[in-house]
Image (spheres, rainbow, N blue to C red):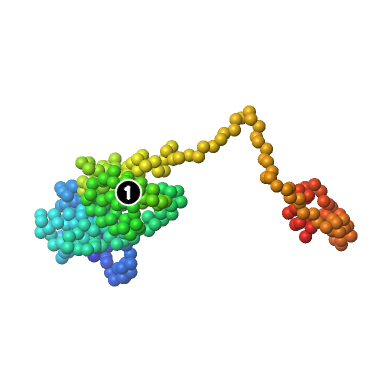
Amino acid sequence: MGIIECWRGLVRNLTTPLSVEVTDDIVGLGGTILGSSGTNPYKNPETDLIALRKNFGALGLDALVVIGGDDTLGVTVRLYNDFQMPVVGIPKTIDNDLALADFSFGFDTAINVVTEAVDRLRTTAESHRRIMAVETMGRNPGWIACFAGMAVGADYILVPEVPIDSPHLISVLTRRRAAGKKCGLVIVAEGAKFPDREPLALDLPPDPFGNLRLGGIAGVIAEAIKEQTGIEDPQRRPRVPVARRSSHCPRPRARNPPGPRRQPARAPASIRHRRDLPGRTDHRFRADSKLRRNPVSRSLLLR
């Protein structure tokens, strides 16, 4: 039996059978066929928590297998500690922040998605000679930004574990541009922050688990790079001076290049004056002034 939409489904008693026919082909699918939600039963314990425990007993479950990330498994631990509910927690987090494990479920997929996206952006960055800052997920750990940055050959990687060093970042990008590198890539985790500052959060209320909705640090980094290097700023790019012509001055006439003037090729007199060709009229071979000035058109006409 499957619980639809995680904790919301257990609070509202939403279930679905998990037969062999339903689950046989899901091995190659990402995500979850049961759905997810941001419901936190401990946010409204007087109603949601009571309903959750009641439905768990009414369904006659021997144990509850919970697959999820930090917030989902955080509720799982509390249910076991508070009510000794029989639960099994399976970490599935793209952040890869697990002790005693090399990789977690979802981490490899996240790296592949970021790598593919950045590879597509590289063409635009090279064409326009830009430095692009790409923001990835990673509230507390920076594994996604770190591994994806190494995979795409990023010029700089910013992770939450290391405070942002703006002078060093600008120095590296400037030195690489001076060495002839046409573009730059900076990979930034959403939780990266400046020294003595909190991570940049969106102007939105926290999620049901109390987490701030992070985002926007890549835009701040991109603006700082533009201001301190002048790259991608049209006001600070060197410009080639162009001589402007006054409105009352006549437009200068084009001068012929020095040397002998080339004469347009003319057809032989036998062709120019023949008028007895079958199926052709006299005007198709008329050597008017336009054809004399355009030998290409004349040669095409005579064919």
**x, y percentage for residue 144?**
28, 56
Residue 257 is left or right of residue 269, and the answer is left
Name the residue furthest top: 248
Q: Residue at x 69, y 43 (%)?
A: 256
Write down the quadrant of residue 232 in the picture: top left
Depth order, front residue of 75/106: 106
Within the image, what quadrant is residue 27 found in? bottom left
The residue sitting at 29% across, 52% down in the picture is 157
* Residue 214 visible in the displayed image: no
In-front residue for pair 31/146: 146
Q: Residue at x 21, y 46 (%)?
A: 210
In the rendered image of this protein, does residue 94 appear above or below residue 251? below
Dot 1 corresponds to which residue? 172
Q: How many marks?
A: 1
The quarter of the image holding the N terminus is bottom left
Where residue 269 appears, as percent x and y from the top left, is: 85, 56
Query: Where residue 169 sits in the image (x, y, percent)?
Result: 30, 47
Answer with left or right where residue 277 lies relative to residue 32. right
Q: Secondary structure at mark 1?
A: helix
Q: Residue at x 18, y 47 (%)?
A: 44
Quarter containing the C terminus: bottom right
